[in-house]
Image: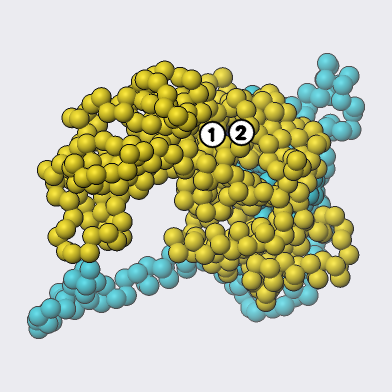
Chain colours: A yellow, B cyan
């Protein structure tokens, strides 16, 4: 059982009578993990982080840090540090003094300060920048200084609020790798806020996907992508095809669901969880396109349809397939299988869509979210 | 763009007189205007400085007689003058100190916190600047005099606000200075990034340390500018001081009093000194601000 570093118990934050920024969140972040809060703008990520940091007091609920109740402690009495979105470096202090700020507050002797600051600047790959002012740094460098300034205090938890938000794409990618490396090197728990699903997926051990003040699903990037349990999560983490259906019965380890046009789709039984009317989904890249009537393995799920649109995108081709005049499904096909030019499927062509039942996920609308801490 | 910047460029027609005049105005217009404006602003100061080197002939320093350093050699050598200057400096110093401290705190709380009466306070702070000085002086006088009457005389001991004197001038100056300090410091606070204070507390500094290590250094240029303004307003004030000074002389009051029978060269000398000090202070604060950026 890994140790819990941060625990949120039924935390709610209201701003005035109408705005519920955070709505009864329960969360457990494990020691040493890279944990992300992912969600669209205004869903309450920053507010959640600010409550953990001590900049905002919850309206109700409890916040624990390494087993200690810190709900009402001011920021300077909590063993957490924050990397602010716009860095918030002190403009009147040199880089050295910025990084040393936390140590100075704790009256660490000069010599040790010097050693640890240069160690830290080494870690973020900015040695020799001690004398500069924050205004003389690039965005990426300021970002690293902000990181060094927080990490030098060896907090139990580091909070990062969209720390890469202001950087351009290339630098962002580079800093993602860098951040992950640093996190592994120092072994500190990171709670990372972002609205970029790709960023969250590449960096995190676990992600809580937030929507309107609570999280809809919590799990590893793979779990969330492969088996989203709400429509929101399915849509937020990439493209997905959703089909409404009704449970017909069971077949071995699978439940059989009747979807559009009477077609039957098999789903691992435990995912259906005994429900009768369901919504199932499948990611576009899991689907294989077959010419109509072509033989396919018995155990695959199979739908017939007509191609509406094909767009060649270099690495892959995206097809929109109309199934039973009811649903449009998106299919990505890697351009590896078709060697001859012009051998792509054409709009109007009849095709079959096939995928393994294990790639079918089931939406549990209404039961996901704040109920518990799965994963 | 180029067409606007060089209206005569394209065909280079033969310059007519009109065009030549237009070109001259084009080229010299702005510099000439600037020189004229600056000269207009500096003329009184130049005259003041020039006449501080005048030779004292008769009682009034209105006409140029001859170059002399007599007044500079003995700048405070008039009865009552040194005492008046001393009072002026003391009041300017104390009122600046008090108004800057109070005004800064007001400015910080006005920009920082929401509380009932905040907008009203914002308005009231502005009022002393908008009220005619003579009205303010007269009402202060009434107020101070009334502290010696029942029922106020039971609350406020005699000698604090009445009879008029050093205390009342000081209180009056602090009062009008606070407004200017609040307005100046508020302007500086407006661009202040709250997250810097949050970052400081995040890094282990409590509210007190955060104020001195982060907030204060960052708004210091504003506070300094406010203090300089307060000092110069105080040392210069005549109208309000005249109502509230009683028998105490500040430098402006002394000048006004002596004007009835004399206008010694020393007045220009002291005026020049005050001006020189002000210039030095402004230069210093500009340098300081430039370094801080
Ligand atoms: N100080 C505040 N006063 C009033 N409402 C606020 C305040 N701070 C946040 N909110 C509201 O609370 C909700 C959540 O805000 P929050 O900043 O946590 O969102 P977020 O997920 O961080 O969004 P973003 O990705 O845009 O930063 C929003 O509706 C926001 O308008
Ligand atoms: Mg945010």
Q: Identify the residue at horizontal 71%, vertical 35% (top origin).
A: A7
Q: Are marks 2 and 1 in contact (CB under 8 Å)?
A: yes
Q: Quadrant of the C terminus of chain A?
A: top right
Q: Secondary structure at mark 2?
A: loop
- Which dot, 2 or 1, sits closer to the camera? 2
Subunit under mark 2: A
Q: Quadrant of residue A73?
A: top right
Q: Which residue is mark 2?
A: A374
Q: Identify the residue at horizontal 47%, vertical 31% (top origin).
A: A253
Relative to B2, is A133 on the left or the right?
right
Relative to A127, is B207 on the left or the right?
right
The crowd level at tag 2 (other Cα within 10 Å; few <14, some 14-19, many 20+) is: few
Q: Quadrant of the N terminus of chain A?
A: top right
User: Foreground: B191 or A332?
Assistant: A332
Would you place residue A214 above or below residue B289 in this image?
above
Q: Position of residue B19 (x, y in %)?
A: 16, 76
How far apart are labels 2 and 1 at the CA level?
A: 8 Å
- In the rendered image, is residue A110 in sight? yes
- In the rendered image, is residue A142 in sight? no
User: Foreground: A33 or B103?
Assistant: A33
Disc assigned to residue A217? 1
Q: Identify the residue at horizontal 71%, vertical 50% (top origin).
A: A32
Would you place residue A243 above or below residue B61 in this image?
above
- Find the residue positioned furthest to the top: B151
């Amino acid at each position: 059982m890994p140790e819990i570093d941060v625990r949120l118990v039924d935390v709610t934050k209201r701003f005035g009578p109408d705005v519920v920024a955070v709505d009864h969140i329960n969360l457990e972040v494990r020691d040493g993990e890279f944990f992300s809060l992912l969600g669209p703008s205004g869903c309450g990520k920053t507010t959640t982080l600010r409550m953990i940091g001590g900049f905002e007091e919850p309206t109700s609920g409890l916040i624990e840090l390494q087993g200690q109740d810190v709900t009402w402690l001011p920021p300077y009495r909590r063993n957490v540090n924050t990397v602010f979105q716009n860095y918030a470096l002190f403009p009147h202090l040199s880089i050295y003094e910025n990084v040393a700020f936390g140590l100075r507050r704790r009256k660490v002797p000069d010599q040790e300060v010097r050693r640890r600051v240069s160690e830290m600047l080494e870690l973020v790959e900015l040695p020799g920048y001690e004398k500069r002012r924050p205004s003389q740094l690039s965005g990426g460098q300021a970002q690293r200084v902000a990181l060094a300034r927080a990490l030098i205090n060896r907090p139990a938890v580091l909070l990062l609020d969209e720390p890469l938000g202001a950087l351009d794409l290339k630098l962002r990618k580079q800093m993602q790798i860098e951040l992950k490396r640093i996190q592994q090197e120092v072994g500190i728990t990171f709670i990372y806020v972002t609205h970029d699903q790709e960023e969250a997926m590449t960096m995190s051990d676990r992600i809580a996907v937030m929507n309107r003040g609570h999280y809809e699903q919590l799990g590893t990037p793979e779990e969330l992508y492969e088996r989203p349990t709400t429509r929101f999560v399915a849509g937020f983490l990439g493209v997905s095809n959703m089909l409404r259906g009704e449970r017909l019965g069971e077949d071995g380890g699978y439940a059989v669901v009747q979807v559009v046009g009477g077609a039957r789709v098999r789903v691992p039984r435990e995912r259906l969880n005994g429900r009768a009317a369901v919504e199932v989904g499948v990611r576009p890249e899991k689907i294989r396109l077959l010419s109509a009537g072509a033989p396919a393995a018995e155990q695959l799920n199979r739908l017939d349809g007509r191609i509406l649109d094909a767009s060649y995108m270099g690495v892959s081709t995206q097809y929109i397939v109309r199934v039973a005049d009811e649903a449009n499904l998106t299919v990505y096909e890697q351009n590896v299988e078709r060697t001859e030019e012009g051998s792509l499927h054409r709009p109007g062509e009849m095709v079959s869509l096939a995928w393994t039942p294990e790639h079918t996920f089931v939406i549990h609308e209404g039961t996901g979210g704040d109920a518990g801490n799965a994963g | 763009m180029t067409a606007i910047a060089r209206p005569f460029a394209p065909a280079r027609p033969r310059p007519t007189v009109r065009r030549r005049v237009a070109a001259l105005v084009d080229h010299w217009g702005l510099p000439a205007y600037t020189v004229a404006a600056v000269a207009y602003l500096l003329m009184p100061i130049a005259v003041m400085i020039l006449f501080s080197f005048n030779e004292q002939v008769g009682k009034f320093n209105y006409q140029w007689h001859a170059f002399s350093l007599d007044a500079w050699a003995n700048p405070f050598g008039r009865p009552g003058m040194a005492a008046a200057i001393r009072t002026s400096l003391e009041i300017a110093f104390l009122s600046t100190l008090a108004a800057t401290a109070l005004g800064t705190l007001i400015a910080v709380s006005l920009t920082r916190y929401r509380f009932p009466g905040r907008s009203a306070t914002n308005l009231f702070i502005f009022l002393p600047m908008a009220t005619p000085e003579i009205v303010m002086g007269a009402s202060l006088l009434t107020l101070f005099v009334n502290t010696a009457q029942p029922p106020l005389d039971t609350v406020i001991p005699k000698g604090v606000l009445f009879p008029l004197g050093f205390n009342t001038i000081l209180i009056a100056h602090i009062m009008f200075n606070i407004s200017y300090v609040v307005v100046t410091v508020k302007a500086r606070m407006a661009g202040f990034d709250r997250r810097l204070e949050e970052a400081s507390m995040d890094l282990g500094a409590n509210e007190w340390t955060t104020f001195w290590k982060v907030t204060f250094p960052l708004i210091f240029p504003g506070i300094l500018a406010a203090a300089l303004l307060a000092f110069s307003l105080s040392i210069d004030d005549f109208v309000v001081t005249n109502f509230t000074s009683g028998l105490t002389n500040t430098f402006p009051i002394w000048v006004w009093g002596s004007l009835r029978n004399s206008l010694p060269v020393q007045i220009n000398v002291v005026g020049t000194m005050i001006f020189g000090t002000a210039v030095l202070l402004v230069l210093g604060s500009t340098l300081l601000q430039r370094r801080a950026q």
